Image (cartoon, rainbow, N blue to C red):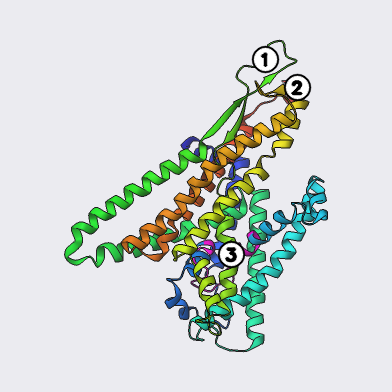
Amino acid sequence: MFNIIKGAFTEKKVRSRVFFTLALLFVFRIGTHITVPGVDASALDELQQSGLFNLLDMFGGGALSQYSVFALGVSPYITSSIIVQLLQMDIIPKFKEWSEQGEVGRKKLNNVTRYATIALGFLQGLGISYGFNALSGFGLVRSQTTATFVTIAIILTAGTMLVMWLGEMITVHGVGNGTSLIIFAGIVSSIPQDIREFYNVQIKNAGDELTQSLIFTAIVVLAIIGLIIFVTWMENAKREIPVRYSKRAQSASDAKLPLKVNSAGVIPVIFASSFIMTPQIILNTFATSSQGQTWYEIASRVFNLSDPAGATFYTLLIIVFTYFYAFIQINPEKVAENLQKQNAYIPSVRPGIATEEYIGYMLIRLSTVGAVYLGVISVLPMIASALWNLPSSLSLGGTSLLIVVGVGLDTMRQLEGLLSKNQYKGFIHPYEELKT
C-alpha cells in the first residue's frame, strides 16, 4: 500500500490526477462552510440528535450543520440514479432499450438522471427548509415567505448540481469514483468532531467512573480496529470458479473466474442511506400539521434510524440493494455468453443456459453472505449506541466505516492500475529510441 501511495506522487501523470482530485475535494469542503443566505444555522443545534439530521450531515460532511449551499450533498443524485436503474428493468421500455445501446444509451440515461436530480433536489430543498424550520420553532428561515423558501430550494439545488459536477470531473479526470469520494471526504472530515464528542461524553464528564470509562474506550477502539480488519478482509474475499478452454492444446489449468463475496461493494449502503432520506424529508413537512396522527407516527418510526423499526427497515433495504446491484455488476447471461465466445467452459457445467444458471446460483449464494455482512456491520453501532448511550452521531459509525474502507480500497485499486499502466513498456518503441 505504501508503495502505491509513494508511486502516486512520483509518477507525473498519476500525480496530476491525484492533485486534481484533492483540489476538487478542497472546493467541496469550502462549499460546506458557505451558509445559505437568509438562514440562521444556529437554530439547528437542537435537531442534531435526530436520525435524519445525522444522516444528511454525514453525506454532506457537516454541510447541514452549517446549512450551507451543499447541505443536500449528493443525496438527490443517488436517489435519481436508483430510480433510473429501477426503471430500466422493463418498467420503461425506452430506458431498457437505452441500457443496451452501449455508450450512446448510457449518455442518454445520464442526462435523464441529471434532470431527475434537479427535480428531486428542488423538492428536497423545499422539504428540509420547511420541515427543519418548523421543527426548530420557525427560527431557521428569517423571512417566512413562499419566495424565500423557493429561493433557498433553488440555491440548494444549484449546490447539489455543482457537487454532482465535481464528482463527475473527479471520475473522468481524477482518481476513483467522484461521488463516492465526496461522501468519503465528508465522513472523514467529521471524524475529529466525533472523537471530541465521544471524549466529552465518556471521559471528560466521567467523574468517579473515569476508570470504567477508560476501559470502555479501549474496548471501543479495539472493536473499531477489529471491524476495519474484518471489513477489509470481506471486501477482498472472493470465490474463484475454475475455467477451461476447449480449443487450446494445453488448457490453462490456473484460469479462474473470480466472483467477489460482496460484488456490490458499498453501493447498497449508500443507496439505502439515500433512499431512506427522501421519506424522512417528506415527513418533516407534515411535522406540525400531522403530529399525533396514527399514519404519521407509524411512518416516522419506519423511516427513523434511531427506532428499532427504522433500523430493521434500513437493514432490509441494504440486503435488497445488495442482490439488486450484484446482478447489475455481474450479468450471468453476458458472462456465460462471453465464455462461450471464447470457447471456454466451467468444468461439469454445460455451456450456455446451464452456465448462466450456475453463475446466477453462485452469485445469489455469495450475495447472501455479502448482504448479511453489510446489514450486520451497519446496524451494530446503532444497537451499541442505544445500549451504552453513545453519541448519536456514532450510531451511523457502521455505515461510515463501510463507506470509508470500501471507497478507500477501490481508490487504491484504481491507483495501482494507473501505476501499472504507466510503468508498462510495450514492444513498439518510439522512432527516436530505435535510432539510438
Residue at numbered disc 2: 343
Q: CA distance from mark 3 to mark 2?
A: 47 Å
Q: Which residue is mark 3?
A: 73
- Give the residue type that dot 2 points to: Asn
Tell me which segment is drawn in magenta. 59-78
Q: Are marks 3 and 1 in contact (CB under 8 Å)?
A: no
Which x, y percent locates residue 425?
66, 26
Q: Dividing the picture into quarters, in which one does residue 179 lie?
A: bottom right
For label 3, the crowd category at 10 Å Cα-Cα, with few meaning under 14, some 14 to 19 and many 20 or more, is many
Of all residues, the one furthest to the top in this rendering is 249
> Earlier along the polypeptide chain: callout 1 or callout 2?
1
Residue density around tag 1, few if under 14, some if 14–19, many if 20 or more, within 10 Å: few
Viewer-closest of 9 and 377: 377
Q: Residue at x 63, y 22 (%)?
A: 255
Tell me which amino acid carries mark 3.
Answer: Gly
* Along the viewing direction, whichever of 114 and 39 lies nearer the viewer: 114
Q: Which amino acid, by three-letter code, is at mark 1?
A: Ser
Question: In this view, which residue lies farthest toward the left?
Answer: 208
How far apart are the alpha carbons under marks 1 and 2? 11 Å
Q: Picture quarter containing residue 290?
A: bottom right
Question: Magenta stretch mostly in which secondary structure?
Answer: loop
Name the residue at 79% across, 44% down.
102
Q: Contact (CB < 8 A) between labels 3 and 2?
A: no
- Image position of 340 (left or right of 413): right
Tell me what residue is drawn at x 43 percent, y 76 percent: 45
User: Considering depth in this image, is 96 or 134 the residue closer to the camera?
Assistant: 96
